[in-house]
Amino acid sequence: MSDPDCLFCKIVAGEIPADKVGETEHTVAFRDINPQAPTHVLVIPKVHQPDIGSLAAAEPEAAVALLVEAERVARDEGTGSFRLVFNTGADAFQTVFHCHGHVLSGRSLTWPPG
């Protein structure tokens, strides 16, 4: 399932280039074009779902695969400590409505986040 107008679906399809750091049967991981930390990688499912809750309900295997890949990215690309962020909805600053987790690492992260 994909959306022909979705930026991330186009990355999954190879229509738009991305600086990929990993790909599995269910996920693609690539560097954020506007990084907020030394390591800032987006991990997305290959299926189109608007947010993590929708993905978990419709495709639980893909949701688990996304979490597993996020941990691998954090281990391989980061410092071991990391933050995994899912923005859900416009008020939470979600700008691409295709589920994606932000893996942030490489510096001390403050709390609360924003």
Image (cartoon, rainbow, N blue to C red):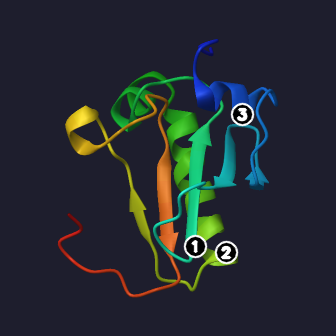
Residue beneath disc 3: 11
Quadrant of the drawing holding the C terminus: bottom left
The amino acid marked with disc number 3 is Ile
| SS at badge 3 | helix
The amino acid marked with disc number 2 is Glu
| SS at badge 2 | helix
Q: Residues within 10 Å of mark 3 (few under 14, many from 20)?
A: some
Q: Earlier in the sequence, mark 3 or mark 2?
A: 3
Q: Quadrant of residue 38?
A: bottom right
| SS at badge 1 | strand
What whole-number distance in Å separates the C-alpha atoms at marks 3 and 2? 20 Å
58 or 27, which lies in front?
27
What whole-number distance in Å separates the C-alpha atoms at marks 1 and 3? 20 Å
Residue 39's disc is: 1
Residue beneath disc 2: 77
What whole-number distance in Å separates the C-alpha atoms at marks 1 and 2? 7 Å
The residue under the point 71% across, 33% down is: 11
Residue 56's disc is: none
Observer-side mark, 3 or 2, equals: 3
The amino acid marked with disc number 1 is Thr
Contact (Cβ within 8 Å) of mark 1 with mark 2: yes
The residue under the point 38% across, 87% down is: 108
**What x and y, as percent, mark residue 57?**
39, 26
Q: Residues within 10 Å of mark 2 (few under 14, many from 20)?
A: some
Q: For this view, does 41 lie left or right of residue 29?
A: left
Q: For this view, does 12 lie left or right of residue 82?
A: right
| Residue 1 versus residue 88 in the image, above or below | above
The residue under the point 57% across, 21% down is: 6
8 or 76, which lies in front?
8
Q: Earlier in the sequence, mark 1 or mark 2?
A: 1
**What x and y, as percent, mark residue 40?**
55, 65
**What x and y, as percent, mark residue 97?**
43, 28
